[in-house]
Image (spheres, rainbow, N blue to C red):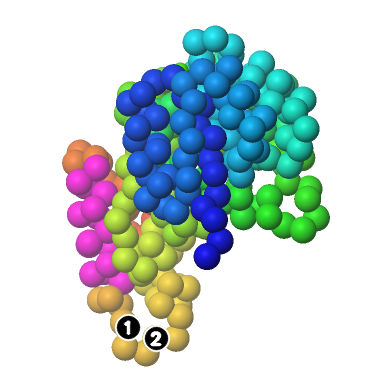
């Protein structure tokens, strides 16, 4: 059995740290929690982890400074780092300074999202070319309604076959996901039932127009659960369906 990847978690808020340690451990990682930058530097020097999750706001040193100091340690450029940030001006700094961090995630975030990020980064950095550290940070939009930044109306994550509507992850069946993905990718574009059948169901021969309507119906119910007053999917009588482009901003 291969050892569990050690994840150094630098975060001063114990509530967040507890949650993250729990989800990381559940997902097969070995989290090591440090509440200060000094502790993180010590931990890192004694045994470099597989990845560092780094809070920007730390009591003794800010996350950017800690990042620089960690990078100066031997063997550090091999270790991917993921920033946790609470403010949009911090996000600007991560991107603008091109620190070479592998990623960042805005607070408040979903712990599952973070674990998924960690896994993706580790997979990416495991590639033999070793070019992982030069990749530009990926934007992860805040996922909670308490976020300072506006929440996107739709967020399509094709890698995870997931769609978020106003920040809420939808529990979709394979075909519901297929239909909504098409609509979301081309807002306003009208898809006929035949087109949807062909693109989503492929050559499944037991499907027919009513199949599409039935899935639209269940999709609408799921969207309604998130935003009861809105009609995100428009029906064009006799023709098909389209994504409503006039939804209010998140
Ligand atoms: Ca903090």
Question: Distance between the Cα atoms at labels 2 and 1?
Answer: 6 Å
Q: Which residue is mark 2?
A: 204
**Residue 168, quarter of the rendered image:** top left
Residue 132 vs residue 49: left or right? right
Measured from the top left, where is residue 62 in percent x and y? 58, 14
SS assignment at label 2: loop
Q: Which residues are magenta?
A: 212-226
Q: Quadrant of the C terminus?
A: top left
Q: Which mark is residue 58?
A: none
CB under 8 Å between discs 2 and 1: yes
Q: Residue at x 77, y 58 (%)?
A: 128
State yes or no: residue 216 in magenta: yes
Is residue 152 on the magenta stretch? Answer: no
Q: Between 93 and 114, which is closer to the camera in this rendering?
A: 114
Residue 207 tag number: 1
The residue under the point 62% across, 23% down is: 41
Q: Choose between 145 and 77: the one closer to the eye.
A: 77
Give residue 203's position: percent from left, percent from top. 44, 86
Whether disc 2's CB lies below 8 Å from ligand 1 is answered no
Q: Residue furthest front?
A: 46
- x 34%, y 47%: residue: 169
Mark 1 Cα-neighbour bin, 10 Å: few <14, some 14–19, many ≥20? few
Is residue 51 positioned above or below 116 on the image? above
Q: Quadrant of residue 37?
A: top right
Residue 215 x/y as whole percent: 27, 67
The residue depicted at 80 percent of the width and 55 percent of the height is 129
**Whether residue 105 can be seen here:** no
């Amino acid at each position: 059995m291969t050892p569990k990847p050690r994840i150094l978690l630098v975060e001063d808020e114990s509530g967040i740290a507890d949650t993250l340690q729990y989800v990381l451990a559940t997902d097969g990682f070995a989290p090591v929690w440090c509440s200060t930058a000094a502790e993180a530097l010590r931990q890192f020097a004694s045994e470099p982890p597989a990845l560092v999750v780094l809070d920007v706001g730390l009591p003794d040193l800010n996350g950017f400074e800690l990042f620089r100091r960690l990078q100066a340690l031997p063997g550090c450029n091999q270790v991917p780092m993921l920033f946790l940030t609470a403010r949009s001006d911090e996000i600007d700094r991560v991107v603008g300074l091109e620190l070479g961090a592998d990623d960042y995630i805005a607070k408040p975030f979903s712990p599952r999202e973070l674990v998924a990020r960690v896994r993706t980064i580790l997979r990416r950095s495991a590639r033999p070319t070793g070019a992982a550290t030069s990749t530009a940070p990926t934007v992860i939009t805040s996922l909670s309604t308490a976020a300072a930044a506006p929440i996107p109306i739709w967020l399509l994550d094709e890698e995870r076959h997931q769609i978020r509507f106003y920040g809420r992850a939808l529990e979709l069946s394979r075909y519901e996901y297929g239909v909504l993905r098409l609509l979301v990718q081309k807002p306003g574009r009208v898809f006929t039932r035949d087109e949807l059948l062909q693109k989503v169901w492929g050559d499944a021969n037991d499907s027919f127009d009513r199949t599409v309507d039935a899935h639209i119906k269940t999709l609408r119910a799921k969207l309604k659960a998130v935003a009861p007053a809105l009609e995100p999917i428009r029906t064009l009588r006799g023709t098909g369906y389209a994504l409503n482009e006039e939804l209010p901003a998140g």
